[in-house]
Image (cartoon, grey):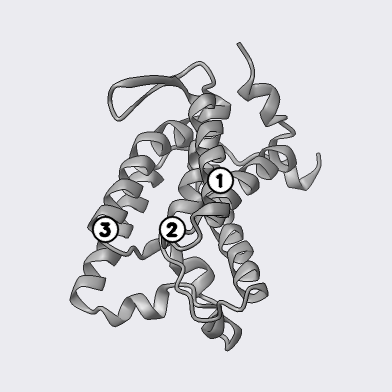
Amino acid sequence: MNPLRRPFRYRYDNITLILVVLNGLVFLLQRIYPAAGGYAALTPALALNGWVWQFVTYMFVHGGFDHILLNMLALFIFGHQVERHMGSREFLLYYLLTGILAGVFSFVVYLLTGAYWVHLLGASGAIFAVQFAYAVFFPQSRIYLWGILPLRAPVMVLGFTGIELVSSIFGRRDGVAHLTHLAGFAFGWLYFVARFSINPWKELTRR
């Protein structure tokens, strides 16, 4: 068997809840010790000078209460289902790897555009990958946008992708890392191809 596709033994450890709690604790630390955000957020100039842990830690710091609330709600809602389907070890690998790679991608973009002192923070890259996985695993599931508008999960994901693509072109000064979100989708797609030998488009368009 291809080592890249060797499955983990299935187990469920509620990693989703652990991640939510960990993000909450880090956010509390930020409130108590604001300088912690500067150490943990991904800043290209600092990462170039050896602060390589930021490629991981940026996923656990947030810019405000609204930021962490929306991210953790999405992680809690979609993460539980994806984790139960994947198993906890696979889910943790997927979450961390897509988040790290989204950060690396953003880091390269920032370097190429001269944005050495921008601060990238938040779990959104990994969470967009989790939402993507949910749509691939549960294409018939319906999500109620704003609690009102029913959308099939693939429509939601493809819609978000389109919004992020447009926003990355026309909304560069809104302070949102749209390219990081898109990278989360992209690396989630590649993970399914490389790890599971699944064609996501085929699953997303299944009826």
Distance from disc 3 to disc 1, alpha carbons, whole Å, reads 31 Å
**Residue 145, placed above or below residue 116:** above
> In which quadrant is the C terminus drawn?
top right
Name the quadrant of the N terminus: top right
Task: Depth check: give the residue in front, 59 or 85.
Answer: 59
The reply to whether callout 1 and callout 2 are in contact (CB within 8 Å) is no
Q: Is residue 55 visible?
A: yes
On screen, 139 above or below 131? above
For disc 1, the marked residue is 166
Q: Amino acid at mark 2?
A: Val
Q: Secondary structure at mark 3?
A: helix
Return the residue found at the far left: 32
Q: Name the residue tied to disc 2.
A: 176
The residue under the point 64% across, 48% down is: 187
Three-letter amino acid code of the residue under disc 3: Gly
Q: Position of residue 2 (x, y in %)?
A: 81, 43
Q: Residue at x 67, y 73 (%)?
A: 112
Task: Give how far across and how far down residue 57 sits, in percent.
Answer: 44, 68
> Considering only order in the chain, which callout, 3 or 2, is on the residue closer to the N terminus?
3
Residue farthest to the bottom, as pictured: 49
Choose between 200 and 157: the one closer to the eye. Answer: 157
Q: Nearer the viewer, residue 55 or 8?
A: 55
Q: Is residue 86 visible?
A: no
Q: Earlier in the sequence, mark 1 or mark 2?
A: 1
**Neighbour tally class for label 2: few under 14, some 14-19, many 20 plus, Cα within 10 Å:** some
- The amino acid sitting under disc 1 is Val
